[in-house]
Image (cartoon, rainbow, N blue to C red):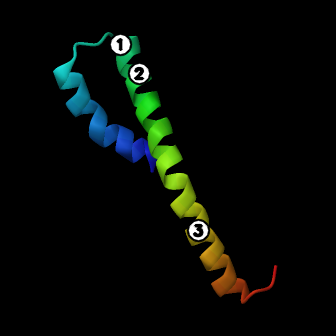
Amino acid sequence: MGILISAALAPQLMRTNSLSGSGEMMLYVMLAAIGWAVTSYPATQVALLLRKLILKGKE
């Protein structure tokens, strides 16, 4: 999910600022990390819910 957020947002941010090649790469990495951090809690909750539904409470 973080990579998708990075791919969607980075081109718009690069238009507003002139960045070198390494600056562009760092922007992609930072946006991917932010996207991963934002989506980690909901993904964990969905995984726990699916585990309960599929295993029916067994571990």
Residue at 68 percent across and 82 percent down: it is 52
Label pair 1/2, CB-CB below 8 angstroms: yes
Where is 52 relative to 23, above or below?
below
Q: Residue furthest right?
A: 59
Q: Position of residue 8 (x, y in %)?
A: 29, 42
Determine whether label 3 and label 2 are within 8 Å by CB.
no
Q: How far apart, in angstroms, are the residues tagged by discs 1 and 2?
A: 6 Å
Q: Which residue is mark 2?
A: 25
Dot 3 corresponds to which residue?
Answer: 45
The answer for how far apart the CA atoms under marks 3 and 2 are is 31 Å
Tag 3: amino acid? Gln
Residue 35 in the image: state x and y as whole percent: 44, 44
Query: Does 20 sit above or below residue 59?
Result: above
Give x and y (percent) for residue 31: 41, 35
Disc number for residue 21: 1
Residue at 24 percent of width and 23 percent of height: 14
Amino acid at dot 1: Gly
